[in-house]
């Protein structure tokens, strides 16, 4: 199982070093942390596996505010999140830019966590399957690709998909693409077990609960325990 922590725009280099001084993940689970760009160097220095939160599709160029695969690789970063719903909602990310970012990063040798997920209105209108199918259609199976299913209504809201909702969406995604699928959206120590126990849930993308070293470690420990059983 893979447990990834998305720190979003939290933790500068000092707080990053403090987290890693205390972070001792259990065996039997792969843990990845995704700090903001300015803290990547401090995070890589810890020796843990580090991903960025975004990556551009060009090697270099006049793209203010973006970061390239070459820069990430030089820093020792191993992968990137692509297409997070906050990128889609606030920064104009589209299925096409997700396609370009993902394809280029994989080609450059980075791993990718590509995020998909429906809005609340889309679920209410019965469009979940169509939305997920459309978002996944720009991706191709690759050994370094992982998809994260993150229902937008469950991100940062404290609302979690029921294990049944997660399982149904994961099974759909896996019928379209042969890659591991992580669940994301208010994952915390209290609900990790029932979500991770679903047959098509291969790990988690944890936001808020990954900022606290104890709660992130607790989610990793649950995953390690389930992997052993
Ligand atoms: P959350 O965020 O766990 O705080 O809901 C998840 C994510 O956005 O990846």
Image: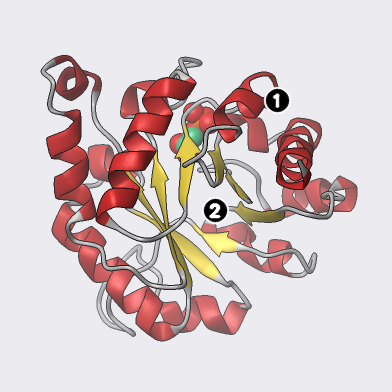
Q: Please give the count of numbered marks on the rendered protein.
A: 2
Which tag, 2 or 1, sits closer to the chain's start?
A: 2
Decide: few, some or many residues near mark 1? Use Cα within 10 Å; few <14, some 14-19, many ≥20: some
Residue 15: x percent and y percent? Answer: 75, 46
Residue 170: x percent and y percent? Answer: 38, 40
Residue 138: x percent and y percent? Answer: 18, 61
Look at discs 2 and 1 and give the one toward the viewer.
1
Classify mark 1 as within 8 Å of ligand 1 or not, answering yes or no.
no
Q: Relative to 26, is 67 above or below?
A: below
Which residue has dot 1 on it? 189
Residue 102: x percent and y percent? Answer: 32, 67
Residue at 78%, 46% in the rendered image: 228
Res 60 → quadrant? bottom left
Residue 104 located left or right of residue 157: left
Q: Can residue 85 be seen in this view?
A: no
Q: Relative to 39, is 207 above or below?
A: above
How far, Cα to Cα, is label 2 from label 1? Answer: 23 Å
Which secondary structure lies at badge 2?
A: loop
Residue 104 located left or right of residue 3: left
Seen from the viewer's position, the closer of residues 36 and 81 is: 81
Residue 67 located left or right of residue 196: left
Which residue has dot 2 on it? 36
């Amino acid at each position: 199982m893979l447990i990834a922590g998305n720190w979003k725009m939290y933790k500068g280099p000092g707080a990053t070093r403090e987290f890693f001084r205390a972070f001792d993940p259990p065996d039997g689970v792969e843990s990845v942390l995704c700090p903001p760009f300015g803290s990547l160097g401090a995070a890589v220095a810890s020796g843990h596996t580090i991903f960025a939160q975004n990556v551009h599709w060009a090697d270099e160029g006049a793209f203010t505010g973006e970061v390239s695969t070459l820069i990430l690789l030089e820093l020792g970063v191993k992968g990137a999140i692509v297409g997070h719903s906050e990128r889609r909602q606030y920064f104009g990310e589209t299925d096409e830019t997700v396609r370009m970012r993902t394809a280029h990063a994989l080609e450059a040798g980075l791993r990718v966590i590509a995020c998909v997920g429906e809005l609340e209105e889309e679920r209410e209108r019965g469009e979940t399957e169509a939305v997920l199918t459309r978002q996944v259609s720009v991706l191709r199976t690759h050994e370094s690709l992982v998809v994260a299913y993150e229902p937008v209504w469950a991100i940062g809201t404290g609302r979690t998909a029921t294990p049944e909702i997660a399982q149904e969406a994961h099974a759909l995604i896996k019928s379209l693409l042969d890659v591991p699928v992580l669940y994301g959206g208010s994952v915390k120590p209290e609900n990790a077990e029932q979500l991770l126990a679903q047959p098509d849930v291969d790990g988690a993308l944890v936001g808020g609960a990954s900022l606290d070293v104890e709660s992130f470690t607790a989610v990793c420990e649950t995953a390690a325990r389930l992997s052993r059983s």
